[in-house]
Amino acid sequence: MKLDLPMLDTAFISSPFDHWASYRAHAPLFFSAENGFWVASRYEDVEALLRNTSVFSSASGPGGDHTYENNHSPQDTAGFLPLLQNDPPEHTRLRSLMSKSFTSRRIAALEKPMHTMAENLLEGLLAKLERDGQADLYADYASPLPVNVIATLLGIPEAFYERLAFWNQALGMGSNPDTQGSLTNEMDEALAAVIVEKRETPGDDLISALVAIADEEGQRLRAHELLGFCKLLWIAGNETTTNLICNAALFLQSHPEILQQLRDDKSLIDAFVEEALRLEGPVNGLFRRLAHDYNYKGCELKEGDNVWLLFGSANRDESIFPDAAQFKLTRKEAQHLALGKGIHFCMGAPLARMEARVAFEHLVGVMHRFKIDDKGGKRIPVAILRGWLSMPVAPVTE
């Protein structure tokens, strides 16, 4: 049976769920000749391939087309994102170094300022609604909240916020590849300048802590790895959380009974975030590349082949999640794969969960005051991610 994988089709990008169900039912691992890669769609297979890092390499990167050699110069590795795009033993070394600075104490310290950020942003959004009769949930809330949080975590001076927010959008997976080269260099130069400043005048922030580790004898981070960590946190830490907030907010608008539950009992928001990650996750899937020939369940995968691991489809696998298409605040089944699995489980998961919880603790109380115009919005135009680039809202007249 030939399965259709229309990666660039807007209808597929908007609603791939029927396609995913067909993959799971008829060919859970198949080769898409028109796209040139394998597709894994069932939970069992996606989880197994994620864990098998000796065969399924992360060096291909998010889009399946990136390679990296350890002897490259910093200039050659401008696009390299450590942890996301490497394998053991380098991944083990880098994750160990990163964990020394990216601590639960540092994350917990962000919660209080995060609430202030959310309050201020929503006040601005509501004021814009009243003044102009329109606002944008993406631009006015879902995007700037993670930007401000990550900037605070990293210790980036406020003067850089606006420019870095622009680079974050311009360099995202839905961006124009023709402009990425110059913008990447520009962003690298700005972050490198911040790193130099933190080395000269360290503070109580993540970049300062990473700089200190980089300067320790025997625990040295290479210059491009330090820069890559900053870029990874800035780009991945912003885009995924922004997508989650937008996706979950649109879901709540179409499920007012769940919105009311959350308004009545905000202690349910943690459970809501987990189920939103499963059902409306920010990343549909990432790629792995075959390190050598490998037979998996009768499929002959060849060295260099790419495999798209469909997290979003795995999270809707009916054999793992009963009534998988339904949103259940009380769901207790197996762990979803929205944040990865195994050694590549998202290191920023606690921060992303906190950001989403805080975002909705404030958002659920005001959503009755506006209506999201999803038809007038703009989705990220790639099938790898599930998110938005604009989400207009208009006031609700009582």
Image: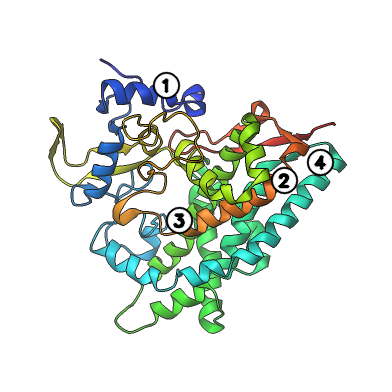
Other-residue count near label 1 (Cα within 10 Å), few / some / many at <14 / 14–19 / ≥20: few
Pointer 3 residue: 349
Q: What residue type is labelled 2?
A: Gly
Whether residue 112 appears in this view of the structure is yes
Tell whether label 4 touches label 3 (CB within 8 Å): no
Pointer 4 residue: 129
Residue 365 disc label:
2
Disc 4 and disc 1: Cα gap in Å?
36 Å
Pointer 1 residue: 18
> Where residue 262 appears, x then y in whole percent?
63, 43
Tell whether label 1 touches label 4 (CB within 8 Å): no
Foreground mark, 3 or 4?
3
Tell whether label 1 touches label 3 (CB within 8 Å): no
Q: In this view, does 176 lie above or below 215?
A: above
Q: In this view, does 196 lie above or below 30?
A: below
For mark 4, give the secondary structure: helix
Disc 3 and disc 4: Cα gap in Å?
32 Å
Disc 2 and disc 1: Cα gap in Å?
33 Å
